[in-house]
C-alpha cells in the first residue's frame, strides 16, 4: 500500500486530487487540514464513507508543534496547505510567514526525518517582471521579483526546501482554473466565472486587460501530480518546474467566458498590479502535446457546475 499524505487537502487542489488517488486501490491517503479556510463538506464525507479503510482525515495546525510520526512510513507528501488569497495577503504578511513558512518548515523537517519525498506547490507569481517591456520566462530565470507577501513567502519556502532536503519537486503553478469541491473563487478566472453567473460586473485591473499571464487547468494539474507520484524516484529529484496550460490575456479569458455566459467588466485598481505581461514556456510532463487540456474547457466545466448551485 502507498501511503500518500496531503496537507491542506480540503482546499481547491486537494479535493480534485484525492478522489483520483483513491481510484487506485494501492493508495492510502492521509489528509491533514486545520479547517481554517475549508470545511469538511458533503463530498469529503462521502469519500470518507466510500473509502473508509484507505482515507484518513487528521485535523492539525501544521504551523504549530505536532508529532511528526503521523508522517512515518509515508511514500510521499504533497504539501498543499497554506493561506492562499494573494490579494488579501497584503494585510496578512505576518500571518503568512507564521502560517505558510511555519508549516513548510515543519513539513520539511518531518520529510527529512523520515526520508520522504516532497511535492511543494509554489507560484509563477515569483516571476513578476520589473521592466516595462513584455518578457518570456522559463524556470531557469534567476531574476525573481515576487511582489505580494504571499509570493515573497513562497520564495522563502522554496529556498528553505532546497537548503534542507534533496528529494523534492517544486511546482511553480500558474493561476489554477476550474471546478473543485473545495474551491474558493479568489483567483481571477474562477472569480470571473462566479461573478458572471451572479450577474456581477467583472473587476478588471486598469493595467490588465491586454496583459498576458500563464494559467493552469485544474484537470491538467491533477494529471501531472498523478504522473509525478507514479514516477516518484525519477521526477522528485530536487527540480523546480513551471506548470501551465496556456498564456492568455485578460481579454482572451473574458472572451472565453462570454462563449458560455454573458459577462460585463468594470475597471478597478489593485495593489498587486504591474505594467508588464509575461509568458512562460510550456513543457509537457504527465500530459502529452495534444490539446487535451485547455483553459476554455476548464471554464466551460466550471460554469456548467455553477449552474447546479
Ligand atoms: N489555486 C491556485 O491558483 C494556486 C496557484 C499557485 C500555487 N498554489 C498553491 O497550491 C497550494 C494549494 O492551493 P489551493 O488553491 O488548493 O489552496 P486552498 O486555499 O484552497 O487550500 C489550502 C488549505 O490549507 C489549509 N490550511 C491553511 N493553513 C493551514 C495550517 N496551518 N495547517 C493545516 N492546514 C492549513 C486550509 O484550511 C485549506 O483547506 C497552496 O500552497 C497554494 O499557494 C495555488
Image (cartoon, rainbow, N blue to C red):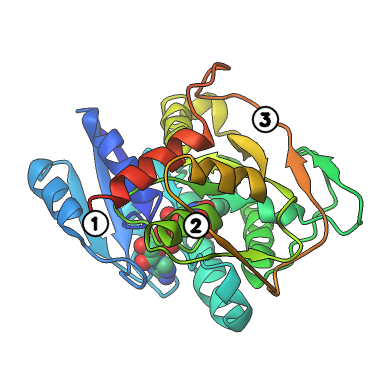
Q: Which mark is residue 79?
A: none
Q: Earlier in the sequence, mark 1 or mark 3?
A: 3
Q: Is residue 73 visible?
A: no
Discs 1/3, front: 1
Q: Which mark is residue 192?
A: 2
Instruction: Tell me the quarter of the picture where residue 9 sits.
Output: bottom left
In the picture of the structure, the residue carrying the numbered disc 3 is: 282
Q: Nearer the viewer, residue 56 or 244?
A: 244
Asked if 17 appears above or below 107 in the picture, the reply is above
Query: Percent from the top left, x then y, of residue 72?
Result: 33, 49
Q: Quadrant of the N terminus?
A: top left
Q: CA distance from mark 3 to mark 2?
A: 24 Å
Query: Percent from the top left, x then y, of residue 269?
Result: 70, 74
Q: CA distance from mark 1 to mark 3?
A: 34 Å
Asked if 9 appears above or below 296 in the picture, the reply is below
Q: Is residue 150 left or right of residue 53?
A: right
Give the residue displayed 52% in from the left and 31% down from the top. Answer: 294
Q: Earlier in the sequence, mark 3 or mark 2?
A: 2
Q: Earlier in the sequence, mark 2 or mark 1?
A: 2
Secondary structure state at the residue bearing disc 2:
helix
Discs 3/2, front: 2
Q: Nearer the viewer, residue 276 or 162?
A: 276
In the picture of the structure, the residue carrying the numbered disc 1 is: 309
Crowd rating for badge 2 (residues with CA inside 10 Å; few <14, some 14–19, many 20+): many
Label total for image = 3
Amino acid at each position: 500500500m502507498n501511503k500518500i499524505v496531503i496537507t491542506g487537502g480540503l482546499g481547491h487542489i486537494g479535493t480534485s486530487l484525492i478522489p483520483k488517488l483513491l481510484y487506485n486501490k494501492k493508495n492510502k491517503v492521509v489528509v491533514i487540514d486545520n479547517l481554517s479556510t475549508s470545511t469538511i463538506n458533503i463530498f469529503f464525507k462521502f469519500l470518507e464513507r466510500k473509502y473508509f479503510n484507505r482515507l484518513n482525515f487528521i485535523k492539525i495546525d501544521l504551523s504549530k508543534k505536532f508529532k511528526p510520526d503521523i508522517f512515518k512510513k509515508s511514500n510521499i507528501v504533497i504539501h498543499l496547505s497554506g493561506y492562499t488569497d494573494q490579494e488579501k495577503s497584503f494585510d496578512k504578511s505576518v500571518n503568512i510567514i507564521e502560517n505558510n513558512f511555519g508549516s513548510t518548515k515543519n513539513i520539511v523537517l518531518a520529510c527529512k526525518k523520515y526520508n520522504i519525498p516532497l511535492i511543494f506547490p509554489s507560484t509563477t507569481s515569483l516571476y513578476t517582471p520589473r521592466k516595462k517591456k513584455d518578457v518570456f520566462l522559463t524556470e531557469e530565470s534567476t531574476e525573481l521579483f515576487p511582489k505580494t507577501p504571499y509570493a515573497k513567502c513562497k520564495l522563502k519556502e522554496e529556498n528553505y526546501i532546497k537548503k534542507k532536503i534533496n528529494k523534492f519537486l517544486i511546482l511553480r503553478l500558474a493561476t489554477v482554473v476550474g471546478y473543485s469541491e473545495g474551491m474558493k473563487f479568489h483567483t481571477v478566472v474562477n472569480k470571473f466565472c462566479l461573478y458572471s453567473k451572479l450577474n456581477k460586473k467583472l473587476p478588471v485591473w486598469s493595467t490588465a486587460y491586454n496583459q498576458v499571464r500563464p494559467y493552469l487547468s485544474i484537470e491538467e494539474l491533477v494529471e501531472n501530480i498523478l504522473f509525478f507520484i507514479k514516477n516518484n524516484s525519477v521526477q522528485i529529484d530536487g527540480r523546480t518546474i513551471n506548470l501551465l496550460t496556456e498564456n492568455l490575456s485578460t481579454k482572451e479569458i473574458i472572451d472565453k467566458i462570454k462563449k458560455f455566459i454573458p459577462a460585463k467588466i468594470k475597471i478597478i485598481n489593485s495593489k498587486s498590479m504591474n505594467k508588464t505581461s509575461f509568458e512562460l514556456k510550456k513543457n509537457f510532463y504527465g500530459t502529452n502535446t495534444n490539446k487535451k487540456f485547455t483553459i476554455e474547457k476548464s471554464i466551460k466545466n466550471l460554469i456548467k457546475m455553477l449552474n447546479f448551485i
